[in-house]
Amino acid sequence: MVIADWPGVDARWSREVDVTSTSGTDAPGTLRRWHLLDNGPELTRRGMVPAGTLLCVHGNPTWSYLWRSLLAAGSDPTHPWRVVAVDQLDMGLSERTGTFRRLADRINDLGDLTDALALDGPVVSVGHDWGGVVSLGWALAHQHQLAGVVLTNTAVHQPAHSPIPPALRLALHPAVHQWGTTTSDAFLRVTHSLAHPPLPPDVRNAYMAPYRGASRRAGVGNFVADIPTDASHPSFAALDGVAEGLRGLDVPALMLWGPRDPIFSDRYLKDLITRLPHADVHRYEGAGHLVAEDRNIAPAVFHWLATRITDGRGHAPGARTSGETAGFKPLWAPLGDLAEGPSAGGTAVVEMAPDGSAARSLTWKQLAQDVDHLAAGLREAGVGPGSRVSLMVPPGVDLTVALYACLRLGAVVVVADAGLGTKGLSRAVKGATPDFLIGIDKALAAARALGWAARLISVRDLPAARRQLLGVETSLAALARAGAGLGDGGQGVWSRDANAFSPDPDPDSAAAVLFTSGSTGPAKGVLYTHRQLAAMRDTVAETFGIQPGHRLVAGFAPFALLGPALGTVSVTPAMDVTAPRTLTARALADAAAAIDATVVFASPAALRNVVATRSALSAEGTEALGRIKLLLSAGAPVPEPLLAEVQQLLPAASLHTPYGMTEALPVTDISLEQIQAAAADAESGTMPGAGNGVCVGWPVHGARIAVIPLAPDGTAPGATPVTEAGTTGEILVSAPHVKEAYDRLWLTDQVSAGPAGWHRTGDVGHFDVDGRLWVEGRLAHVVTAPDALVTPVGAEQAIERLDCIRMAAVVGVGPAGTQAVAAVVETDPPTRKAGPAGMQLAGKVRDAARSAGVSVAAVLVVPAQPTDIRHNAKIDRTRLSRWASSVLAGGRPGTP
């Protein structure tokens, strides 16, 4: 084989080494010839001193070629690392020994090799597939040299209650094994087919090259046969030793995972996280088993090396020290205060029936007691600190009780709602790997059908047959009854004298994973600590003056759950909370009347439908809405004309449109009157910086805001926050209630981290001279035209002022740097077919955009804009850009 034929490989990396074997399989002193890809000699020749060595171990049936991107990155003179990618014996281009080498032998073989190479540290082991186990076995035996470990799609433990992956089960079957792995090249071809996207032909050929001919594939078959399927297998003890040894491995760790892996699914990642809880984890959505082929993992690896392996020897993060608790009031604390105070018998939470009547309610005393009992029952069922519990229950009494019971136990609640759609919801749940899932029947059926690996708990008691069909262990009702029967001396969870659930969870321990809407890519899990959730509550209370005794109608699930923590009476209207536009004026009025509401939270899409259905309001409903004192609406820009119509329905209410995101809610606040004043300033031109976007006001209590200026290419590469008026840039926020991290998205978290203490929002905006923030769109949606950068929101607002336009999107078409601006509009009334707009409409749209300083090259119409499911308001501009590009290139319009 000609080395130059390997795409992506420098021929100078290839070398062979004779190694004296000490394995029990070989006679002492036996020489074995290994093949390596090693950039070390070339680094030396170029006078570069590496920071350390990456010892890379492939799995089955790949070879050292898998790690070529790390070899190339390690050869960069700005941050050189020696990368030694081995071909295990009987694999790749290494010697065919003619012996069956077990896991313990392979670990020992690798040690023999590193001794021969005189690797003396610092060494970071890197492994994939069963090479991950071998690399970890070496790491445990060489901790004096070890600086860190990197793992990609591997496993160290097979749960006794679950079968091995079907693909491996088939490969092990006596009728298939020899033919599938050795006689033919089927096992190789099937493995290569797992790449997403498919491997290019030259890369696929490089992977096949060392294994042409049955005599070259014996190691492939033996590797499969050495997979321990149970405790009787000869390699089970070695595998178990590696698995248990990881629990004490105190070095930095990085796990890079492809979740589309039919072999090593997320359940194996979850197991590894329990053994290495300090590990940094990044899941590449859409990537699979060959994650190093599906994604360029080198930037992640080398960024991690730079940030974690700081002193050349590595350091483990160690256990997190407990945070200060002075002045900290956990999210559930108000429940106890109100349950023991004069409001004990007052209503705490109300659940509406579909007909608009109040179906269920709890007093503060009942709520505290129910949380107490359910927490006790959940604890007996195995829920404890750190347990992940997915809640798939509609807003109401059951969800409120379950949420606060889980938080009180120190469990991590996972909130991924059906608003993500079936595919997005399944992706989110699988990625979060909950230990328990509490759900209604529909959610339980989905868990069963879609393979969500969790212990299932129903809301209500189910008949035995249905419970068995769904795989349900128990119910919330049964757990609450069990918890009530446990007893705690009559004191309960809220007692000042005897707390059955002490100690409280650490304020800085994980409390919740909340998922983004998925409007700008796959929904991301956002991890919050108890302290950050409490800070969110305190920020909302301070900013909007919400106090115990206020009464909240929440048309958005997170605010319904925050209500009890604020001490407010809470109700969710009769609506589909996963589709905000289903909220009607009558349902809002019924909910308001049920609790004599003073506060309403609803998304812009919900408000649109409320205004559209106001004719159905009764006199009593109109009166109930007239008693509202505060309206909050967030999730997307809220047009001033819509707010003006809402003001007519809620004449006594102060209307506010806080700006925020799942990662930090809220960030700024502004009232209708302030919006109108900002619009007047923009129109008059007397206020520098006013205009070109949505004015979202000033920072909320405890928050700071700045921007990183845009570069000519539409990125924001700087690191210095600025607040000067008129400077457009990526918006940064710093506040006590900003998220802790993106869950299992370490690389995304690194990208979102701005200068120390700041979170990069991905939004673009600027300040005016009065300190107000104007949001201009998303960083990813900035149009890079030949002569200027175009941010979309200002032009979109100008277009939407036309009576015939309901929603508008401004997108870029063509290559970056030379993009043309296209406007995609949803008309009122809607058009029947998507495609280029008529001349008259196109002219109106161009004139409107021109008034905002934007020259539009093309105008297209769609029957309905593609919006996110959760808010029904965030337009998918990236999708529209692709669609517009296709249409303008002569493609069939179809549906965007």
Image (cartoon, helix red, strand yellow):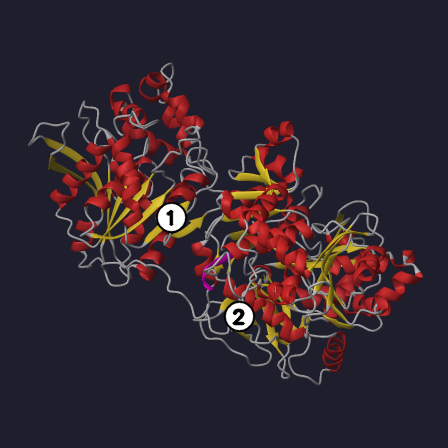
Residue 692 coordinates in the image, percent (x, y): 67, 72
As helix, strand or loop, the secondary structure at mark 2 comes to strand
Q: Residue at x 70, y 69 (%)?
A: 657
Given residues 261 and 195, the one toward you in this image is: 261
Residue 491 coordinates in the image, percent (x, y): 56, 59
**Number of residues whose C-alpha sits closer than 10 Å to that of mark 2, classed few (under 14), some (14–19) or many (20 or more):** many
**Badge 1 is on which residue?**
255
Given residues 408 and 255, the one toward you in this image is: 408
Examine the structure image and report whether residue 509 is included in the region drawn in magenta. Answer: yes
**Badge 2 is on which residue?**
732
Place residue 137 in its image quadrant: top left
Residue 237 coordinates in the image, percent (x, y): 26, 32
**Number of residues whose C-alpha sits closer than 10 Å to that of mark 1, classed few (under 14), some (14–19) or many (20 or more):** many
Q: Residue furthest left?
A: 29
Vertical comparison of 772 with 643: above or below: below
Question: CB of mark 2 within 8 Å of CB of mark 1?
Answer: no
Q: Which residue lies furthest to the right in this view?
A: 619
As helix, strand or loop, the secondary structure at mark 1 comes to strand
Amino acid marked by disc 1: Met
The region drawn magenta spans: 506-512
Q: Residue furthest bottom?
A: 686
> With 31 as the anchor, is 36 left or right in this view?
right
Number of marks present in the image shown: 2
Vertical comparison of 398 with 469: above or below: below
Residue 790 coordinates in the image, percent (x, y): 62, 66
Q: Which residue is drawn at 78% across and 48% down?
A: 863
Q: Residue furthest top?
A: 175
Q: Which residue is drawn at 28% across and 30% down?
A: 236
Given residues 884 and 128, the one toward you in this image is: 128
